[in-house]
Image: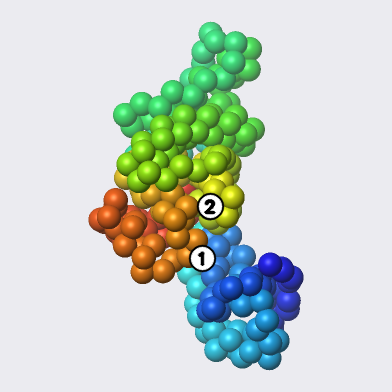
């Protein structure tokens, strides 16, 4: 596999070439990163032709991302701002606490952020608190790791497919991955998704332990354990920007 950046008109595109890949495909991440996945030996002239034929799609997709960002500005971590947690939209609620450390307590409709008294002042209720992002990410990673590890064990037993290891981290684009050594990685941003969506991603990655592709056999296996996988994939596609931190 090789990767390089190329300039195409006004676009900077990450080209990833992979041995065994048969089709050329283009994708744009929620952040606007353009990636082209191509067969290892695809000629440069064909890459350029493919990009030319996709130029209108690139413009339209980037315009949609730009419009979404205008309607959904970057998080400020301010009182009342919302955060997805297991499919529920929770309002951030800063409160003074007598604990010595910051604590996060999800409830039915809010995410309580308990601030130690020594760090508390009334501005916590009126101004953005961007410093809370890293402690929040740490909390969400811990929550997701505990939850997902149980679901991986459950689905591994159901599917009789055992990964060699499972890693949990925040990733920009991939919801999950599985390599040829049988190691799984799951995106901690999935903590914002409903439980059935998390299950789908786990089933999807476990299925790669048997089929390292997206062949009909692969999707047949996924559908056997997750009949509504198409709807769940669509939920992820539509809501991916809302799961950002």
Dot 1 falls on a residue whose secondary structure is helix
107 vs 222: above or below: above
Quadrant location of the C terminus? Answer: top right
- Image location (x, y in percent) of residue 22: 54, 78
Label 1 crowd (10 A; few <14 / some 14-19 / many >=20): some
- Specify few, some or many for label 2: CA neighbours under 10 Å numbering under 14, 14-19, or 20 or more: many
- Res 12 quadrant in image: bottom right
The residue positioned 40% from the left and 27% from the top of the image is 106
Instruction: Tell me what residue is drawn at x 58 percent, y 31 percent.
Output: 138
Task: Kindly identify which numbered label has been placed on residue 178.
Answer: 2
In the image, residue 84 lies at what x, y percent? 41, 41
Q: Is residue 92 visible?
A: no
Q: Mark yes or no: residue 191 visible.
A: yes
Q: Horizontal placement of 135 versus 149: left or right?
A: right
Q: Quadrant of residue 230?
A: bottom left
Relative placement, left or right, of 49 versus 231 is right
Residue 65's disc number = 1
Of 237 and 165, nearer the camera is 165
Q: In the image, what residue occupies the spot 42% across and 39% down?
A: 152
First in sequence: mark 1 or mark 2?
A: 1
Give residue 182's position: percent from left, percent from top.
54, 48
The residue located at (57%, 53%) in the rendering is 179
């Amino acid at each position: 596999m090789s990767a390089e950046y190329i300039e195409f008109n006004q676009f900077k595109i990450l080209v990833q070439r992979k041995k065994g890949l048969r089709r050329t495909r283009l994708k744009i991440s929620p952040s606007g990163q353009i990636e082209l996945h191509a067969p290892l030996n695809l000629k440069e002239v064909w890459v350029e032709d493919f990009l030319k034929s996709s130029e209108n799609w690139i413009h339209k997709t980037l315009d949609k991302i730009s419009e979404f960002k205008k309607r959904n500005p970057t998080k400020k971590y301010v009182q009342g701002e919302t955060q997805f947690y297991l499919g529920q939209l929770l309002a951030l609620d800063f409160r003074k606490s007598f604990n010595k450390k910051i604590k996060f307590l999800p409830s039915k409709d809010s995410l309580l952020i308990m601030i130690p008294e020594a760090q508390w002042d009334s501005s916590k209720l009126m101004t953005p608190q961007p410093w809370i992002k890293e402690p929040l990410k740490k909390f969400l990673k811990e929550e997701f790791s505990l939850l997902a590890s149980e679901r991986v064990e459950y689905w591994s037993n159901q599917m009789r497919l055992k990964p060699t290891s499972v890693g949990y981290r925040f990733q920009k684009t991939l919801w999950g991955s599985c390599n040829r050594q049988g190691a799984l990685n799951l995106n901690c941003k999935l903590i914002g998704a409903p439980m059935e969506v998390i299950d789908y991603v786990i089933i999807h990655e476990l299925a790669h332990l048997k089929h390292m592709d997206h062949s009909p056999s692969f999707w047949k296996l996924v559908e056997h354990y997750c009949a509504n996988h198409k709807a769940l994939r669509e939920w992820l596609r539509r809501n991916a920007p809302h799961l950002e931190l």
